[in-house]
Image (cartoon, rainbow, N blue to C red):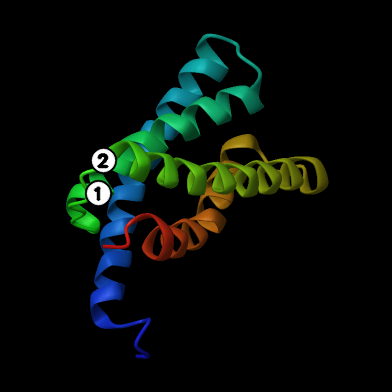
Amino acid sequence: MSSFWSYATFYKLIKFGVVGFSGLVVDFGFTYLFRDILKVNQYVANGIGFCLAATSNYFLNRIWTFHSLNPDITFEYLRFFGVSLIGLGINSFVLWFLIKKFKMKFYMAKAIAIGVTTLWNFIANLLFTFVN
């Protein structure tokens, strides 16, 4: 592997994926709550679920994946959340595109959209958020 894609980086990607899976549970759970129970617009519900998952993912990734010791948690969180907002834009576009252009069911499209944003989020957080 090249110096960027070292085994240590690959191991972080695996851990990032595990954290991401926990975020998936948070994301889908809150999206379901807001969309299907509280009857909030599906794109707003998607945004709420995504933002809550991003917050839980920040803390888990800070501690477990990247072992960040940055004392400025607020600044680091804002960087992480900024990366996540770009990811939300990517996520929302893919979600909209798959629903409108391919008539895909909402939750199937959402799962694909999450997969598309995972690589972006990992690389951006590795190179921008959690630089020690």
Query: Tag 1's secondary structure?
Result: helix
Q: Quadrant of the C terminus?
A: bottom left
Q: Amino acid at mark 1?
A: Arg
Q: Quick check: 45 left or right of 28?
A: right
Q: Residue at x 21, y 54 (%)?
A: 68
Q: Residues within 10 Å of mark 2 (few under 14, many from 20)?
A: some
Which residue position holds label 1? Answer: 62
Give the distance between the C-alpha atoms of the residues marked 1 and 2, in whole angstroms.
5 Å
Question: Quick one: which residue is furthest to the top in this view?
Answer: 38
Q: Quadrant of the N terminus?
A: bottom left
- Residue 41 against residue 99 in the figure, above or below: above
Could you tell me residue 50's position as x and y percent? 49, 35
Quarter-of-image position of residue 3: bottom left
Q: Amino acid at mark 2?
A: Phe
Q: Quick check: 115 left or right of 90?
A: left
- Residue 94 against residue 25 in the figure, above or below: below
Could you tell me residue 27's position as x and y percent? 43, 33
Could you tell me residue 43's position as x and y percent? 65, 28
Q: Residue at x 47, y 32 (%)?
A: 51
Which residue position holds label 2? Answer: 59
- Residue 117 against residue 44 in the figure, above or below: below
Q: Marks 2 and 1: in contact by CB < 8 Å?
A: yes
Query: Tag 2's secondary structure?
Result: helix
Q: Residue at x 37, y 63 (%)?
A: 126
Could you tell me residue 117's position as x and y percent? 54, 54
Q: How many marks?
A: 2
Q: Residues within 10 Å of mark 1 (few under 14, many from 20)?
A: some
Dot label at residue 10: none
Q: Quick check: 69 left or right of 15?
A: left
46 or 102: nearer the eye?
Answer: 46
Q: Residue at x 43, y 24 (%)?
A: 30
Question: Quick one: which residue is furthest to the right in this view?
Answer: 101
